[in-house]
Amino acid sequence: MKILSVIRKSLKEQYRSFWLFILTVSSALSFVLIYHLIVASYDQSYRIDIINYDIPAIIASGNKSFGERLVDEILLCDTLISFEINEAESRQAAEERIKNRKSDVLVIIPEDFSERISGAIAGDTLEPIPVELAGIWLV
């Protein structure tokens, strides 16, 4: 019951200063509109290039390229709507795309990617795999 009296008192105060109420509501609406205009004015997708230097690991069941599987899964993923992902041909071409602002970041999968994952599957201890990132801030 105490909350109802607080609400009633607040409504009476707002009614007494009607123009202040209008100003408060209109400023909140204008901030929402301005935020919408800011967000709508720029592209919200990030362009990512991937280079796969991975060498397939030779295991008992044949050659396995986990780097190729990773790239295929990323390229075929439907839930990455904020990302435009491309497989780059070479590092130089990808860095040139970054310099020309046609790409935002470059992800480089190392040569021993499959070997390390195969070793982890076989029971070896898995150390973190260094995946190299390059972008406009790094080039």
Image (cartoon, grey):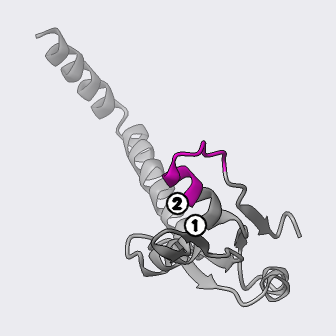
Which residue shows up at 81% across the image and 82% down it? Answer: 91
**Outermost residue to the front:** 60
Who's the residue at 75% across and 64% down the image?
A: 133
Quarter containing the N terminus? top left
At 66% from the left and 47% from the top, the residue drawn is: 128
Indicate the position of residue 49 as horizontal and vertical percent values: 67, 79
**Pointers 2 and 1 in contact (C-beta within 8 Å):** yes
Q: Which mark is residue 68?
A: none
Task: Answer left or right for 124 relative to 32.
Answer: right
**In the rendered view of the protein, which quadrant contains the C terminus?**
bottom right
The residue tagged 2 is 35
In the displayed structure, 90 sits above or below 38; it is: below
- Horizontally, residue 80 falls left or right of residue 119, namely left
Q: Position of residue 23 (x, y in %)?
A: 45, 46
118 versus 97 height, above or below: above
Farthest top residue in view: 2
Front-lying residue, 69 or 38: 69
Q: Is residue 27 magenta?
A: no
| Amino acid type assigned to the residue bearing label 2 in the image | Tyr
Label 1: element kind: helix
